[in-house]
Image (tube, rainbow, N blue to C red):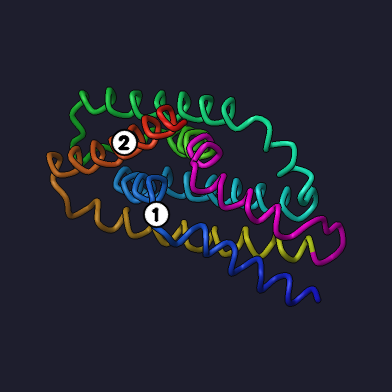
């Protein structure tokens, strides 16, 4: 049973991690700043995925029932936070990023905090794990631990692969192309925020 739950967790973790959405694009771009901030961001994404999985395993359908009456508040709050992150990122592009720029000492911690917020309010992640919560029901035994561990490890491996790919590609891109990819990634976050805000 524990092995089956672990496999189910790995599948669930890959299911939410592999499709390349806004967070994945931004993680690839973070790799172009250097390995340290990209690794911090990758770890944050996996940690949030694991946290959502823990809620799914431990709280079950009760959480889905509680969230059902607050869709508007959750949607508006998430849209505002996503919009703020997008604006902050786009405004930051006014500073020229040279290929030789090195990440500052605190860049990994800042990346961890930023990607934690992005993943927490990412609509794809929220919808995915809300559905998972409703489907699994409550489970407080060893199976729950195995499931959450599987989700976390699968997401962690995939996110770090994206971070490594971004770090490898970043060394080959000029500053203008790097700025364009950052703008595209944060623009995608802004579009997600707008769509969430306008959704009825």
Q: Which mark is residue 82?
A: none
Decide if residue 3 is on the left or right side of residue 185.
Answer: right
Relative vertical location of residue 83 with respect to residue 12 in this rendering, above or below = above
Depth check: give the residue in front, 42 or 199: 199
Q: Which mark is residue 186?
A: 2
Relative vertical location of residue 37 with respect to residue 155 in this rendering, above or below = above
Q: How many marks?
A: 2
Kindly report the distance in space between the C-alpha atoms of the residues bearing marks 1 and 2: 17 Å
Q: Residue at x 39, y 26 (%)?
A: 83
Outermost residue on the front side: it is 200
Element assignment for label 1: helix
User: Residue 170: image x %, image y %?
Assistant: 24, 51
Residue 178 occupies quadrant:
top left
Element assignment for label 2: helix
Going from N to C along the chain, the mark reached first, 1 or 2, is 1
Decide if residue 45 is on the left or right side of residue 107.
Answer: right
Magenta-highlighted residues: 117-143
Residue 123 is inside the magenta segment: yes
Q: Residue at x 29, y 47 (%)?
A: 32
Question: Label 1 belongs to which residue?
Answer: 163
Residue 127 is inside the magenta segment: yes
Mark 1 Cα shell of 10 Å, populated few (<14), some (14-19), many (≥20):
many
Residue 126 occupies quadrant:
top right
Mark 2 Cα shell of 10 Å, populated few (<14), some (14-19), many (≥20):
many
Depth check: give the residue in front, 196 or 81: 196
Relative vertical location of residue 18 with respect to residue 67 in this rendering, above or below = below
């Amino acid at each position: 049973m524990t092995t089956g739950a672990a496999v189910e967790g790995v599948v669930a973790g890959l299911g939410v991690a592999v499709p390349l959405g806004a967070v994945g694009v931004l993680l690839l771009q973070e790799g172009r700043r250097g390995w340290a901030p990209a690794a911090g961001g990758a770890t944050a994404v996996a940690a949030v995925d694991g946290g959502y999985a823990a809620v799914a395993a431990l709280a079950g359908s009760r959480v889905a029932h509680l969230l059902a009456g607050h869709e508007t508040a959750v949607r508006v709050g998430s849209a505002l936070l996503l919009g703020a992150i997008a604006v902050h990122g786009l405004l930051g592009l006014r500073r020229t990023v040279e290929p030789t720029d090195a990440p500052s000492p605190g860049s990994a911690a800042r990346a961890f905090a930023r990607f934690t917020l992005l993943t927490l309010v990412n609509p794809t992640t929220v919808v995915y794990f809300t559905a998972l919560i409703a489907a699994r029901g409550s489970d407080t035994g060893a199976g729950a631990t195995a499931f959450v561990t599987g989700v976390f490890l699968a997401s962690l491996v995939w996110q770090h692969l994206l971070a490594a790919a971004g770090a490898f590609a970043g060394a080959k891109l000029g500053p203008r192309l790097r700025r364009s990819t950052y703008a595209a990634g944060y623009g995608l976050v802004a579009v997600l925020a707008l769509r969430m805000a306008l959704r009825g």
